[in-house]
Image (spheres, rainbow, N blue to C red):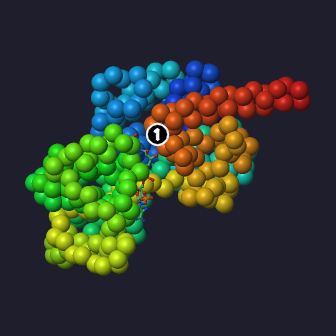
């Protein structure tokens, strides 16, 4: 079985992972970054990015991630196409197992595994996933040209997805459980000004209805959150945009998590409850969750690792 050792292994290839790679490589730590199943992370399923500083013109999420990746490699980060399926944080060095069968060992770890889309967990939502129910407008929007779709949620993702889908679909209905959105005001303005988008306040998706053969969505039942009344309306596609959950399954029971399953980090630091393990980006951030804050946390994690390793070196020098 192949094995690899590194002073620092970064798990995850989003803004946090790549930025950690850039800083750790420039600190001559020869970082190894294991990219996982979605290289580029959530930014690869977004389109226009208008709030990442440094670009006066609108840029594309996938392009930004390609740039970060190229920069990380250019300064010396080794990027490996593998997905970690097991992690042992109790032993030193830390041990990781890749889907490829490779065993990795590391003196320090930066966890930058990000977050993934949340679902409502309705049985009918699961049944029609990939057959009219999606969590990614930029991936699946194309199939709904000239059709009627709903987007569920009231945050930035939901509003951005609705705006994106309005370019393709005949009509978009944004279904939100309350009567105000939590998304940025500038996005709200665009949403309300778009003649193809209607907002249904105080409604929750109760059930997805459809055909069995071939499997496909034909309608939805919505519940009024104020009156409890059910309404059924015909629909071609359902997009769920109700937030994200941190990807921490690998580390459960081995590292301290906070509410919502995010990795707990020490105040003002990326250090976790396990000495030598650092966490950066959406996996540890339940407050800001922006590409730019993830990149900032990735930078902090690399600097924290550098200090940690310097401390370890001092200890081993003193022991010699
Ligand atoms: P979010 O801000 O957490 O919003 C989730 C939305 O889904 C909320 O409106 C919430 O309703 C609703 N929701 C949650 N659970 C629900 C349920 N069970 N049933 C019905 N509705 C439910 O998530 P997000 O929009 O994915 O954004 C995540 C983070 O990424 C945010 O910090 C956001 O700013 C950031 N982001 C930024 C950009 C950008 O800057 N352009 C783009 C995308 C995302 P309530 O409002 O009632 O809680």
Residue 4 appears in the figure? no
Could you say where residue 166 lies in the image, as x and y percent from the top left? 19, 49
Q: Which residue is outermost to the right?
A: 319
Residue at mark 1: C-beta within 8 A of ligand 1: yes
Could you say where residue 262 lies in the image, as x and y percent from the top left? 58, 53
Q: Which residue is outermost to the bottom?
A: 229
- The answer to whether residue 72 is left or right of residue 122 is right
Could you say where residue 199 lies in the image, as x and y percent from the top left? 26, 58
Q: Nearer the viewer, residue 75 or 19?
A: 19
Q: Nearer the viewer, residue 159 or 27?
A: 159
Q: Nearer the viewer, residue 137 or 228?
A: 228
- The answer to whether residue 157 is left or right of residue 297 is left
Residue on which disc 1 sits: 290
In the figure, 265 relative to 149: above or below? above
In the figure, 49 relative to 97: above or below? above
**Secondary structure type for disc 1:** loop
Q: Nearer the viewer, residue 226 or 107?
A: 226
Could you say where residue 121 lies in the image, as x and y percent from the top left? 40, 69
The quarter of the rendered structure image containing the C terminus is top right
């Amino acid at each position: 079985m192949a094995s690899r050792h590194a002073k620092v292994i970064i798990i995850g290839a989003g803004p946090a992972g790549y930025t950690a790679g850039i800083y750790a490589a420039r600190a001559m730590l020869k970082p190894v970054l294991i990219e996982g199943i979605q290289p580029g992370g959530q930014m690869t399923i977004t389109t226009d990015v208008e709030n990442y500083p440094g670009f006066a013109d609108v840029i594309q999420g996938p392009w930004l991630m390609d740039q970060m990746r190229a920069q990380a490699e250019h300064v010396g980060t080794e990027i490996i196409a593998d997905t970690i399926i097991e992690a042992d944080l109790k032993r030193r060095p830390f041990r990781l197992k890749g889907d490829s069968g490779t065993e990795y060992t590391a003196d320090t770890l930066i966890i930058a595994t990000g977050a993934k889309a949340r679902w409502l967990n309705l049985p009918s939502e699961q049944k029609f996933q990939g057959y009219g129910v999606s969590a990614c407008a930029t991936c699946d929007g194309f199939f709904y040209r000239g059709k009627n779709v709903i987007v569920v949620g009231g945050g930035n993702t939901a509003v951005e997805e609705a705006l994106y889908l309005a370019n393709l679909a005949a009509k978009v209905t944004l279904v939100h459980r309350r009567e105000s959105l939590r998304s940025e005001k500038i996005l709200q303005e665009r949403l309300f000004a778009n003649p193809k988008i209607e907002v249904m306040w105080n409604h929750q998706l109760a059930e997805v209805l459809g055909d069995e053969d071939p499997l496909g969505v034909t309608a939805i039942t919505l519940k009024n959150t104020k009156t409890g009344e059910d309404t059924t309306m015909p629909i071609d596609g359902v997009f769920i945009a109700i937030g994200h959950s941190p990807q921490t399954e690998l580390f459960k029971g081995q590292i301290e998590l906070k509410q919502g399953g995010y990795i707990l980090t020490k105040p003002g630091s990326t250090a976790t409850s396990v000495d030598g393990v650092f966490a950066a980006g959406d996996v540890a951030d339940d407050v800001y969750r922006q590409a730019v804050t993830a990149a900032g946390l990735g930078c902090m994690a690399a600097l924290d690792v550098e200090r940690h390793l310097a401390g370890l070196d001092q200890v081993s020098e003193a022991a010699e």
